[in-house]
Amino acid sequence: MFMNLSNQEKIDILRISKKIFICIVRHTRKDLDKLSLKTCIVKDLRISGDDVDDLVQDINRYFQIDWSSLNFKEYFGGEGFSIVEFFVF
């Protein structure tokens, strides 16, 4: 994953990841040590619906990201119980 990156690029990715992980810890109470770049927000952390919106707002405190092109419902689903998610996950 990091093989073709310079040392500075690796440091930047780790710095950014750490800030995002801190936001995730605040919203999920998961252990920071259990998070990785492979952690799936929906499957592993069970964050969906309005909780994703709260997480995104927290991340925006650190980074100014234009989220307008991301279809949140496609990736994170809506709020509440989903029979599809129940059987798929």
Image (cartoon, rainbow, N blue to C red):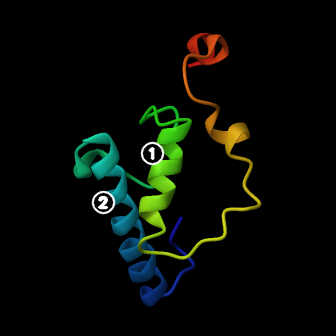
Q: Is residue 42 above or below residue 15?
A: above
Whether residue 41 is visible to the viewer of this picture, yes or no, is no
Could you tell me residue 68's position as x and y percent? Answer: 73, 62
| Three-letter residue code for mark 2 | Ile
The residue labelled by disc 2 is 22
- Circle 1/circle 2 CB separation < 8 Å: no
Image quadrant holding the C terminus, namely top right
Could you tell me residue 82's position as x and y percent? Answer: 61, 16
The residue labelled by disc 1 is 39
Query: Could you tell whether 45 is left or right of 87 in the image?
Result: left
Label 1 secondary element: loop
**1 or 2: mark nearer the eye:** 2
| Marks 1 and 2, the one that precedes in the sequence | 2
Could you tell me residue 46's position as x and y percent? Answer: 45, 31
Q: What residue is rendered at 54% in x and 64% in y?
A: 1
| Three-letter residue code for mark 1 | Thr
Q: CA distance from mark 1 to mark 2?
A: 14 Å
Tell me if mark 1 has few (under 14), some (14-19) or many (20+) residues whose alpha carbon lies within 10 angstroms of its own. Answer: few
Q: What residue is rendered at 53% in x and 81% in y?
A: 5
Whether residue 89 is visible to the viewer of this picture, yes or no, is yes
Q: What residue is rendered at 36% in x and 51% in y?
A: 24
- Nearest the viewer among 83 and 2 is 83
